[in-house]
Image (spheres, rainbow, N blue to C red):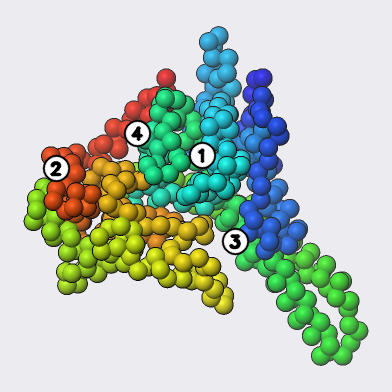
Amino acid sequence: MRVQLPIPSVLFVSAWLLAGCGQPPPATFVLNEKATKLLIPEAQETLKQVLADNFGDPNQLVAWQKFPIDYGAAQPGPDNKDRDADGWRLKEGRNLYMQHCLHCHGVSGDGNGPTARFLNPRPRDYRQGVFKFKSTQAPFKPAHADLVRVLKEGIPGTYMPSFVLLGDEKLGMIVDYVRWLSIRGDMEIKLYNELAAAGATPKDVASTVENLLQEAKEDGGKRPGKSELNRKTIDDVMKGINDGLAETVETVASDIAESWAKAEEPESVIAPKVKRTPPSPASIDRGRKLYLSQVQGKKTQCADCHGPAGRGDGPNTEQFWPIPGTTPERKYETVGLHDEWGFPQQPRNLTRGVYRGGRRPVDIYRRIFAGIRGTQMPGFGGTVLNDEEIWDVVNYVLSIPFDGKASAYPTEVETEPKAEVADVRKQEAGDRGQ
């Protein structure tokens, strides 16, 4: 089936409407559980409508051009029947995602596919826009090349396999669809927060109604019915929301678009200012002392999570940690660390030499420099450790599987990371233009 001609969305005339066919049984995007629990039904419906207007549904996608995603410009021609209308890349990315990724990551990208509950660690929930393994500075989204690399190499020690056999073009399509899902989920969460801040929660409505009843009681006049005040309060809240809805959506979308665009700038890449220190016994020993926080003024506390021998059994794995954002504070029911999604998180057992974010020295450097988003692994670059000290820790970490006697990649000379990323991005751009 041909993709339908461009049709503007309700709120934004810069969107293309893409029709799909040949899909599995009808699939739908589910509303974030947080919104369904904490927003009043009227606000939930408004949120659903905004998302539908600007992103569509799994079988009727909307490609909002505001975001830095290659949706696929039309390539008319007798040999391009599947590419003769704008938006073909998003549609093909959707088809590939449904085939290869949905069973773990879910239709909505919420990490809750049909096989997800059997996996440990759990598949990534893209909706927060949080990705663990990337080359960019901590505040930024992953670069396009980062996500391509994950698809090519998989994530060692997890159920995420390599899809390198799909080829660069198909991998690029999947990455853009994953980024589109992440943008949609990020929009949902940020708009939820805006609606909640505007008073569209059952708690806020109930509080307003009680205040109005109290005021009527103090005035001594006729007391209106509680249901009447409840309806009026909800109507007032929703009127205020709807009056500024288009501007709110535009502002939130601009912020998200900018965050993804910045990830592609060379300045966002974590690039060591100095090359890797040769992994000599002296460097490994310096790294060991830093790892164990035995250097004055250098409290890395690595051993608190990873253990003194690097076995992932530090004292932090034996505590009951508080759940962030709970009032009054509550603690997790299971002992040990938890990630941003609330799932148990086991610190890496460094004796095994398995590194989920990549085993190149520069990969380990970036984990130490910026931390790992979505986890309790902090970053030490620019605050606790300088570049030379980070390389010493890298050399020690890479020596742990060898009992500290030698470091992995002993003859490795790291090329300029910025140039490396730039070359990958240039290659990807060429692939998409073919």
Q: CA distance from mark 1 to mark 4?
A: 17 Å
Foreground label between 3 and 1:
1
Is the C terminus in the top left, top right, bottom left or bottom right quadrant? top left
Task: Place residue 371 in its image quadrant.
Answer: bottom left
- Per the model, the C-alpha gap separating discs 4 and 3 is 34 Å
Residue sitting farthest toward the top: 78
**What is the spatial separation of the Cα atoms under label 3 and label 2, in whole angstroms?**
49 Å
* Quarter of the image that includes the N terminus: top right
**Residue sitting nearer the eye, 361 or 232:** 361
Marks 1 and 2, Cα distance to the nearest angstrom? 36 Å
Q: Residue flagged by tag 1: what amino acid is it?
A: Val
Q: Are marks 2 and 4 in contact (CB under 8 Å)?
A: no
Q: Nearer the viewer, mark 2 or mark 4?
A: 2
Q: Is residue 277 visible?
A: no
What amino acid type should be assigned to the residue bearing mark 2? Pro
The residue lying toward the viewer, choosing from 7 and 136, is: 136
In this view, the mark in front (1 or 2): 2
Classify 10 as above or below 291: above
Label 1 sits on residue: 178
Disc 4 target residue: 425
The residue wearing badge 2 is 410
Task: Give the secondary structure at mark 3.
Answer: helix
Say which label, 3 or 1, has the lower sequence index.
1
